[in-house]
Amino acid sequence: MNYIGSKHTLLPFLERSITLVAGPYRDGQTFCDLFAGTGAVGRHFKRIGYQVTANDLQYYSYVLNRQYIGNHTILMFHGLEEEIPQIRDVLFDDMRGAKVCEYLNFLKPIEGFVYQNYCKGRHQDGEDYRLYFSDDNGGRCDAIRQKIEQWRGEGKLTEGEYFFLLATLIEGIDRVANTASVYGAFLKRLKRSAQKPLTMKPAEMIYNGQEHYVYNEDANQLARHLHVDILYLDPPYNQRQYSANYHLLETIALYDSPQITGKTGMRDYSGQRSQYCSRSSVKEAFRQLIQEVDAHYIFLSYNNEGLMTFDDIRSIMEERGRYGCFKQEYGRFKADNESDTRHIAGDKTTEYIHYIALS
């Protein structure tokens, strides 16, 4: 996913920085990604071998992390063998999920919540409508989402299987969204990628032989109960609320038919506003987190354009432990260049990895 603040391109820098301070991975070490987003960082450290804890306040992020971090055994889908007998015929057990996704790809579209509210649908050319998806993809999303929920309600899916399918749908519908990468607005005409059919491409399974933990909580509240070796922090840097930028993924993940308002069909996100997106509250929230968490090492990703200054961060972290910092330039987040040709002055920003050692 093309996600604001994603650390995918910075993973080598992040791993190198953490290893220089905390040393290479040792058996039994724990790693916590407290503001996990799409889970790119947690996935990377899960592959290395860590026992990973991931958390995010957004439910769609919880779904993605529940799949990529939480799932750690092969999913068998025994409960669907009568409805999808082809599952029994696969040569390798880890291909069973692909058979279920193939089945879902052929469901007939239905006119559900997504179709009715985020597609052209039955609207005439002169009427207002929200063109987030093509009609076909909106209807396919509704059909797949309802089938996944039906199977869960009938007890045909384990929790791991449920989140595997839901994460696969979220990533699939995001690939065909008619947006400039975020859901704060939609495009007036369907771009090329939005005209492609929604496809359930099975989410990757990552195994490392350990049990992992995933939460959907306020970071500061959860931090009080953590006991980890390495704590990684990647909070929002500015005033953009993720709950507004990705509201439609939240609605598809929950599929709760919320009351929506305005031109963009926004759901109420008042309960998901982050303290880290407010200049008046960010420093106190950060100080509280740093003071209360139990970790051997704390690492913070933050760039040079954030609400907290370099000196703010250093001052707060030095109160707790031995401080240091690494930095690297990287390309700033850009919207889909097919649909957004605006020139943004400067295409580079500086990412800092602040750290403190408490052991």
Image (tube, rainbow, N blue to C red):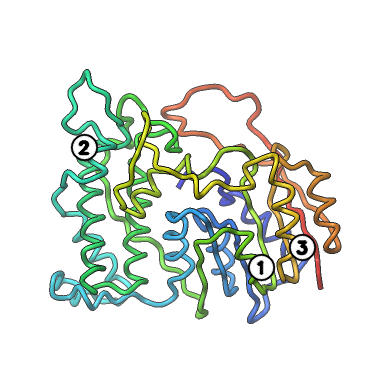
Residue 14 falls in image quadrant = bottom right
Residue tagged by mark 3?
Answer: 291
Q: List the residue tagged with mark 2.
A: 135
User: Looking at the picture, does residue 335 appear above or below residue 101?
Assistant: above
> What amino acid is at disc 2?
Asp
Secondary structure beneath disc 3? helix
Residue at x 39% of width, y 47% of height: 249
Q: Position of residue 166 (x, y in %)?
A: 33, 59
Q: Position of residue 49 (x, y in %)?
A: 58, 74
C-alpha distance separating marks 2 and 1: 46 Å
Query: What is the spatial separation of the Cα atoms under label 3 and label 2, in whole angstroms?
Result: 50 Å
| Tally of marks | 3
**Amino acid carrying mark 3 in the image:** Gln
Q: Amino acid at mark 1?
A: Arg
Q: Could you say which disc has been placed on residue 224 in the image?
A: 1
Q: Secondary structure at mark 2?
A: helix
Q: Position of residue 339 (x, y in %)?
A: 42, 28
User: Which residue appears at 29% of the width and 68% of the height?
Assistant: 97
